Amino acid sequence: MALATLLVLPSTSALRIWVGNANVMVAWIPTVWYGSEKIFLNISLINQHNHPANLIHSAMKNLAIIGTGITGLSTANLLKSKFEVTLFEKSSKPGGLIKCDRINDNLFHRVGGHVFNSSNQQVLDWFWDFFDREKEFTKAQRNAKILLNNEILGYPIENHFHELESSVVSNIIDDLLAIVKSEAPKVPGDYPHFEAFLVGNFGPTLYNLYFEPYNRKIWNADLAEVPLAWLEGKLPMPEPKQILLSNILKQEEGEMVHSTFYYPLENGSQFIVDRLAQGLDIRLNSPVTLIEVKSENLSVNGETFAKAVYTGDVRCLKNILVGIDSHILDILERVNDLPSNGTSNVFCECDPTDTSWLYLSDPGLAAHRIIYTGAFAKSNNRGSDRMTCVVEFSGSHEESFMAKQLKLLPGNLKPLAFNYEPNSYVLQKPDSRQLIKELKEALLTTGIRLVGRFAEWEYYNMDKAIEAAMGASQDILNLQLSPF
């Protein structure tokens, strides 16, 4: 195949393509065909710079990214050398679920508390290219605890059941020995749902005492209707023998990704957001209200783009996406029923502690966890002579109700600020992954790519969101000359 070379004739502003020793006049208009795609050229740049390399650069395709959470920002940085990237953000600041605010100079993680680590070396290498790990971050050991019947226990509970009353310990041991003797499935994927996994792996005593009440609070769902596959990699999956050894030998849990984690010395996850946002074209206060699919490109809020990456809530596409066929419309109708949970978060002053997370399983407590973000970095408490934390409730609650609930929790909590996030956790149905797969495949022909927690309906933490962005970006780069 002959190599085509682009050349601009400055005297006429006409564009010629050289193929071998032959040249052909293409057009007097600022478009060319590159492979199978039409590329729109910046003719003013062509007039000024008549070198083929400059022409190729000016012909770089533009890409819209909807959403500036960790997925959107990561995708933008991964693709900015190959595309002219524009990001649309409906809020007044970037960050999505991981953005933070300063309240009286104390750092408020508005939706939980976000830390970083990964078991994926590619994710680690990419991430640390943006930061000085030694000077800008601290590395911490996860020190999580459980509040159960007004007693503080170690976490995870299966490693610390020896701290319970002797009669309860005896029942748990009986359960674990029965699991060993039974012919119940031992591979997580063999269990039909979340409830069956918890009972099958840990026994009915631990399930009724801790796993059921805690998970019912956080997911606000019948655990028998929660598919197990989507929680893979986020759950403890020890064998009964290992559970017994951990209690006999007093071993701590250390296999989960975030048993150790990195945290910025200043401004928490907002520091990560701000660094990743540097140099990007971000349109703040710009909610996307219309994405129109055309024959050769896309229109996002009336602006033309070659392609788009959507990291927002996939359920919203039904109301903003036009120019699509009936098959995509049908899938969007079904996607609209995907369930999610919101969270109400209370930012508090509290007594000093070295605990990082405290899990609250007692059904009499409306909150399901306390995240001691003030223990992650001293700068998080800069405006107070006490420590700070975030108390998280599943669902929407009145501020007065949450303030009363704080009095039931340890640490002499004093509320400083409140935040309600209507969509924090995705919940999957048995057919959710297949439904999203169908939608992603159908959207390939439109030039729209779905990436991220609420776009792909996956429970991504920060590292998994970056991993998803890396995979999607590589696919996009591999298919630059074809639709997604």
Image (cartoon, grey):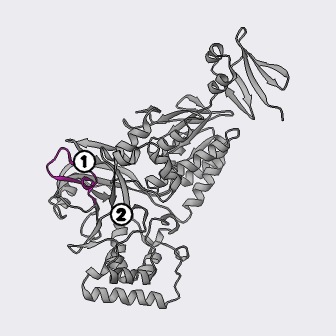
Q: Residue shown at 49%/89% (left/top)?
A: 182
Residue at the image position 30 percent from the left and 47 percent from the top: 265
Per the image, the residue denoted by label 2 is 218
In magenta stretch: residue 395: no
Place of residue 58 in the rendered image (x, y in percent of width and height, measured from the top left): 62, 24
The reply to whether residue 417 is in sight is no
The tag earlier along the polypeptide, 1 or 2, is: 2
Residue 252 at x, y percent in the picture: 34, 73
Q: Is residue 123 above or below residue 290?
A: below
Amino acid on which the number 1 mark rests in the picture: Asn
* Magenta region: 370-389
Asked whether 379 falls inside the magenta stretch, the response is yes
The amino acid on which the numbered mark 2 sits, given as a three-letter code, is Ile
Q: Which residue sits at x=53%, y=44%?
A: 317
- Which residue bears the numbered disc 1? 380
Q: For the residue labelled by badge 1, is the local secondary structure a helix, a strand or a loop?
A: helix
Point out the image quarter for the C terminus. top right
The answer to which of 251 and 395 lies nearer the viewer is: 251
Q: Is residue 135 above or below residue 173?
A: above
Q: Quadrant of residue 448?
A: top right
The x, y position of residue 53, in whole percent, is 67, 25
Residue 445 seen anywhere in this rendered image of the structure: yes
Q: Label 1, label 2: how many angstroms apart (C-alpha)? A: 26 Å
- Residue lying furthest front in this view? 134
* Disc 1 crowd, CA 10 A, few/some/many (<14, 14-19, 20+): many
Measured from the top left, where is residue 25 in percent x and y? 80, 18
